[in-house]
Image (spheres, helix red, strand yellow):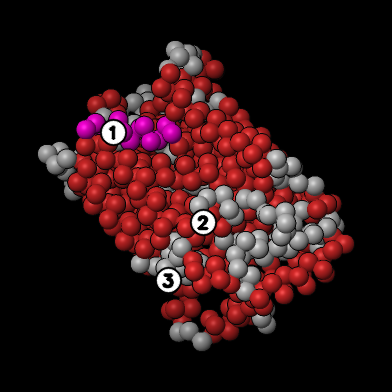
Amino acid sequence: MGVDPEIAPTTSASKTAEVFSQHDGDLKEGLVENNGHFTAAELAKYGQTKRGLSPRHVQLMAIGGKTNLPAPACVQVLTTQSGSIGTGLFVGIGGSLSKAGPLSLVLGYIFWGALFVWPAYLCVAEMCAYLPLRGAIFELAARFVDPALGFAMGWTYFFAGVMLVCTEYSAVATVMQYWNTDVNPAVWIAMTMVVCVFLNVVAVKWYGESEFVMASTKVLLLIGLVLLTFITMLGGNPQNDRYGFRYWTSTGGGAIHAYYAEGATGRFCGFWSVCIYAAFTIAGPDMICLAAGEIQNPRRTIPRVAKLIFYRLVGFYVFGVLAVGIICSSRDPRLLGAIDAGEPGAAASPWVVGITNLGIKGLPGLINFLILLSGWSCGNAYLYASSRTLYGLARDGQAPKFFLKCTKAGVPIYAVGAVTLITCLTFLVSSNNAVEVFYWFVGLTTCALVATYVGMLWTYIGWHRAKVAQKFDESLLPYTAPFTPYTAYFALVIGVLMIIFIGYDTLVPFSVQGFITSYFGAWFSIFVFIFWKMFKKTKFVNPAEADFISGKAAIDEECKKWEEGGIEENVKARLAEMPVWKRCWERMW
């Protein structure tokens, strides 16, 4: 997001002292906004968000809160969006399993998680830990690449986030149809909307607590299903069937399937379809970026979340997809029939199909209920994310200023209201099939999310070039991402390839609807980038003049209570005052 050229400080390495002095003065005079747009009078008028998210909130938001894949109810959630642990693993994974086979499923998730998601998290953590700004990553894009990139990323992510809220609401409606098909799905959407708005408006602390609880249920469900698979594959089931890896053999369904073409090309297309699905289901670092301005002790919490994300997120997913390919055959007639029929909720889950085949009773309804919580969690998370994106755009003068208005609890109330108003589009389900409406929203968001993550990597490359050009002292960074900039460049290439080939299977035979929904996000992002560049006549940032300083003095003052005397020393002193059980609990996060 753009920095006003009339107020932006000089940021070359030779002027560092001057800039610090200027911003220290601004802080005392009440210029608390990160880039100088916000005066003390505006702060009194609008308020601002508060640092109310603890480390455990952020860990669970990053792992299980952001599940854009709420389409649990839909059987073909195969085309769903990016997200964390959630419906993608519980229901939608059945489509990928049947298309590509269990081995391709595991390899695709390892490829995308290790080579794109993990580097993206680490790169974003380095930047946001040093400057945990409100509206962080979009502001940093403007500082280190081009103000037009910050504008484009902000509005692209806002578009994707709002559409994902719609996706989640429509997904909850389809899940509810597992139990009751007589009630109009608009009733379930209204119910979900009221609960999510309430949790987002009462205060960020309660949002964090609600997201922590709902995300925890998803993590526990996944752990339970993986353990169930391990036990039953060794014979611990009503049929005493020690089935092991039977479904990976040619007689059990096969390990790798050809998709879209025959032979080796088809097997690669199957693998790539899994990569696309993984890109939709494995969360990117956007929650860390958007919550950076509301995280307690951000210079310790953000690096900690990023370092653990590989083990917690990729590990959960890899074990999850491995287990689902073990418990259910990719050619199971019941699974394929549920997918073809578009059965709602857990009916199309390969977990439920496998459990039913083993003669285990009572679990399908419980799993569907937990999937319902997953969809609710997704709507809750993306209402938060999209409202904070709009708030950040307003802070930088790229959206109407009244969206800056915050409650005393730090909630951007008008931004939350605007997102809620737009998501009333979801009530289209009252006159259309809920699954159909769900896929409209899914198609409109998929590419936009990947494009946003690519923009984050581009921002990091600009950040790294600026560090080199200004001979930046890396000892000042709370966290340094390993193997950079090589990992950033490599992940950027993978992300660009994903955008180019995300809709390859809509080309032959050509599907107008499929092509538009697959690529709309990319074209939208390019359009808003060019629009802002021409409208504001922005220029690419010279690395030697990139801004490492604006807002840092205000953040240092805000974080002083956690950092004076040493960050880790303060944490150890705080833990020492706790009883043993609470100390162990806190150390988990």
Left or right of 91: which side holds 387? right
Q: Residues within 10 Å of mark 3 (few under 14, many from 20)?
A: some
Q: Earlier in the sequence, mark 2 or mark 1?
A: 2
Q: Which mark is residue 409?
A: 3
Foreground: disc 2 or disc 3: 2
Q: Quadrant of residue 321?
A: top left
Please say whether residue 143 is one of the residues in the magenta stretch.
Answer: no
Q: Amino acid at mark 2?
A: Lys
Q: Which mark is residue 435?
A: 1
Where disc 1 sits, the SS reads helix
- Residue contact between numbered discs 3 and 1, judged by CB atoms under 8 Å: no
| Cα gap from disc 2 to disc 1, whole angstroms | 37 Å
Residue 470, picture quadrant = bottom right
Question: Magenta stretch: dominant SS?
Answer: helix
From this view, report whether residue 198 is shown above or below residue 341: below
Crowding near pointer 2: few (<14 within 10 Å), some, many (20+)? some
Residues under labels 2 and 3: Cα distance? 19 Å
- Relative side of 81 to 126, left or right: left
Q: Which residues are magenta?
A: 431-444
Earlier residue among tags 3 and 1:
3
- Please tell me whether residue 120 is drawn above or below residue 267 in the rendered image: below
Give the amino acid at mark 1.
Val
Q: Could one spot residue 236 in this view of the protein?
A: no
Residue 3 percent location from the top left of the image: 67, 54
Q: Mark 2 highlights which residue?
A: 401
Q: Nearer the viewer, mark 2 or mark 1?
A: 2
